[in-house]
Amino acid sequence: MADAPSRATLDMLRRLVAHDTTSRNANLELIAEVEAHLNDLGAHTTRVHDDSGRKANLFATLGPTDRPGIALSGHTDVVPVDGQPWSTDPFALHDDGARVYARGTCDMKGFLACCLARAEALREAARETPVHLVFSYDEEVGCLGARRLLDDMRSWPVRPSAVIVGEPTEMQVVNAHKGKLSVRATAHGLSCHSALAPEGVNAVFACSRLAAHLADLAEHKRANGPFDPSFDIPYSTVHAGVIQGGTALNIVPSECSLDFEIRNIPGEDATDVLAGIKQHVREHIEPAMQAVHPEAGFTYEESAAFPGLDTDPDAAVVRLAKQFAGANASGTVAFGTEAGLFAREGMPAVVCGPGSIAQAHKPDEFVSHDQLARCERFLDRLIEHLRAS
């Protein structure tokens, strides 16, 4: 029979998923509830808000505040449920005895619930080495909250010496993942009647030529690398997802946009890949556009972006996470997390959390009882480690 999580974890998860923290919404009600829970335990808490004041990160310290310690980190926002065929209310926990269903159970309120349910025990054990609980906003739309938090943390006198990000890895320790850079390229052409098409600059054609180049580049990466065999897809990928332009068939379109992304292995810089794409546009697409209309060309807007994670498998944080997980090895995943941002700021990080990424963002999202129980055991070993130190 599969292990079962504690009633405290399930009750906490029930409370967390009841807050609709879809990224378009505020997260302050959830943050206030979590903050009150931790303040009752004597935690030192700090909020870092976004510009609107509608969202906040929460950084809470259990134990002494004058030394680095270990951070347990996760995001509070979830993806939308719009148009998805859910069998039950996505913002009310449904427990069938083996799995719990609701938006965010897997990605990633299950991890947050485990941490909060163990917060009192963590506080009692963190007499010498503190434990920091980090709750961010807007991870799903570009890791915006973590960026704001890290901007503030640069001026803090003490920061964590190790970070464990609880994204769903089925409680496997992950020391490396790919980075991501999302870009909207907009072609600016010249409109005219389609009967006089050669007198205009067709922005749809221009974006189509860019899309064809991206397809060629994606194939080049697949065939020639560079490669990192530790990943299931051992090379950087290039993908085009959305193209939009034009108003009517008899009008040469003056504007068209193309959304594409680069998911890079840690050994390759996504900004270098993007620079190569822009160079191709300058040399092979824009000259023909500008021969007709000198002001024609492309502009670019970068949106979601996060660096890859490439923590040394022998780093202290990896060894500790393997000890807590009862694992003998660490690995890699293709999806990205906030861990790369922490690592870039000098805080060594790993990813390890309950649930499978295969369940994330889907209707009837779930996390199993067994996964939550394994996460609780992970935290119990951390508590034992703190007591021993």
Image (tube, rainbow, N blue to C red):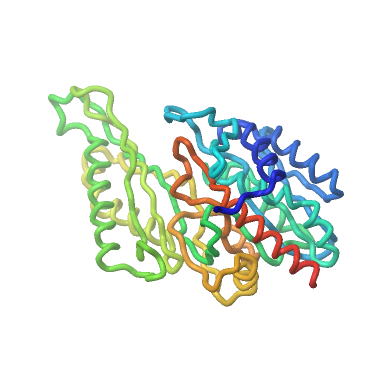
Q: Position of residue 163 (x, y in %)?
A: 65, 61
Residue beneath the point at 54% across and 28% down: 89
Q: Quadrant of the C terminus?
A: bottom right
Q: Please, is residue 142 above or below residue 164 in the view?
A: above
Q: Residue furthest left?
A: 195
Viewer-proximal residue among 301 and 363: 363
Q: Residue 178's quadrant in the figure?
A: bottom left
Q: With 375 as the anchor, is 227 left or right in this view? A: left
Q: Position of residue 208 (x, y in %)?
A: 24, 42
Q: With 206 as the anchor, is 94 left or right in this view? A: right
Residue beneath the point at 31% across and 68% down: 225
Viewer-proximal residue among 45 and 325: 325
Q: Residue furthest front?
A: 1
Viewer-proximal residue among 326 and 44: 326
Visible in this render: residue 147?
Answer: no
Q: Position of residue 241 (x, y in %)?
A: 33, 42
Q: Residue 386's quadrant in the figure?
A: bottom right
Q: With 370 as the anchor, is 383 left or right in this view? A: right
Q: Position of residue 68 (x, y in %)?
A: 76, 65
Viewer-proximal residue among 285 and 129: 129
